[in-house]
Amino acid sequence: MDLPQFTAEPSPDDSGGLPVFDVIIAGCGPTGAMLAAELRLHDVRVLVLEKETEPKSFVRIVGLHIRSIELMAMRGLLDRILGHGRQRPAGGFFAAIGKPAPPGLDSAHAYLLGIPQPVIERLLEERAIELGAHVRRGATVTGFAQDDAGVTVELAGGEQLRARYLVGCDGARSTVRKLLGVGFPGEPSRTETLMGEMEAGAPQEEITAKVTEVQKTHKPFWLRPFGGGVYSVVVPAEGVRDRAEPPTLEDFRHRLRAIAGTDFGVHSPRWLSRFGDATRLVEHYRAGRVLLAGDAAHIHPPTGGQGLNLGVQDAFNLGWKLAAQIRGWAPEPLLDTYHAERHPIAEGVLDNTRAQMELLSPEPGPQAVRRLLTELMDFEEVNRYLIEKITAIDIRYDFGEGPDLLGRRLRDVEVKRGHLYDLLHRGRGLLLDRTERLTAGAWSDRVDHLPDSTAALDVPCVLLRPDGHVAWIGDDQRDLDDHLSRWFGRPTG
């Protein structure tokens, strides 16, 4: 489905002629770019400020989990992304316990997509720009002030910009979060790990044998081949250091020799970094006209590969709600549901990464628990529970009493016009109506209607929010109208 092309030119307001956007986003990583694209689907004027002058050059591989892959399919992005990644089975994520995924996961996209981080960031930024978002690189936010009408943002050098809302998507060291002054409780790093990609001179069979031996006592240790002699290398660091100070190749060699007795002849690094197990979550995702998303709102160890996915899913939850607020049709509490829905999800991710980090400890107690959990994961129900948690397809928002499907995302079911997700590219709500007698009525400017008695559902009708979560189930028009008002505001006309 072709989408309309917009422009997002600023307009002057009556307060000193400052440029006015609807939303300024600080940070053009995956979260910020995804949010910009979501807002542009609703003709919101968006400016993205990125302090880095150039996109990342190092080729770090990240993984899109099932729910994030589904979101890309919902917006028609998956086809352009798939060719840049490598699919692998959706198993072995939880604390690197090597169990295969259980059969029959409830998704048409039950796999992990490994993709270079610069590529996914570029593709999402290009999409936002295609839809009309403005992206300014080399623009560092140094301050802001909010009032009843909007937010004045100050950049390094003194330039000021004006917007109705500001969203901090500027990472774990978020300037927006610090300036906002919201609490960021949690635990500092206790341990650190070196991570990078580099070539190795040792033979593959020698590396495999030594890694297998070391992993008996050091779980967070590996050299995984990418091909062409390039390896992903993870090795425990000696202590906790300033993460702003990047490690050196010699740091890697030193730690590899200390733990494995050899440095495997590593050389020619693509990128080098360190990560800790600091775990923190903001107390509030919103304070007035300033909101937080992605790593600006939550930090945790990368165990299970959930960080990028959590941020992209934040953006997907926030985008349509913030757009509704700006377009003037949002019900009063709609924007507050962003915090109410996403804060508990982040709490759950922080807890499961805490648990995984314990299971990676070489101490006897955690290793005993790890052996027990490894046995328990032979039960399909246990394995399924953990896989669905890591891949975020278990999420159920609290929409009140109702069937189990209420509040959950709906898989990409077959409909008479092809597949459900193909109908969600425009970021609108959708009434999927198997009775073929209901109507979106006065909400048809915000909600599409598909009468289809053949749809692969076991309920009469569902009302989907723009993020694909089921907001209503039933077959009564009056009840439907109540829920349309709840999620999509007052009827038009």
Image: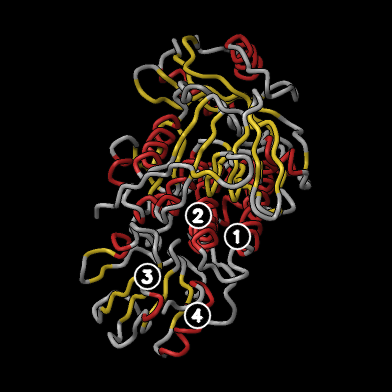
- Could you tell me which secondary element the residue under label 4 belongs to? helix
Mark on residue 445? 3
Mark on residue 483? 4
For the residues bearing labels 2 and 3, Cβ distance under 8 angstroms = no
Give 42 or 32, whichever is nearer the viewer.
Answer: 42
The residue sitting at 43% across, 63% down in the picture is: 466
For the residues bearing labels 1 and 3, Cβ distance under 8 angstroms = no
- Residue for badge 2: 319
CA gap, disc 1 and disc 3: 23 Å
Q: Circle 2: is it few (<14), some (14-19), or many (20+) Cα within 10 Å?
A: many
**Does 319 sit above or below residue 419?**
above
Precedes in sequence: disc 2 or disc 3: 2
Precedes in sequence: disc 1 or disc 2: 2
Q: Position of residue 224 (x, y in %)?
A: 46, 27
- Could you tell me which secondary element the residue under label 2 belongs to? helix
CA gap, disc 2 and disc 3: 17 Å
Precedes in sequence: disc 4 or disc 2: 2
- Could you tell me which secondary element the residue under label 1 belongs to? helix
CA gap, disc 1 and disc 2: 10 Å
- Disc 1 marks which amino acid? Tyr
- Disc 2 marks which amino acid? Gly
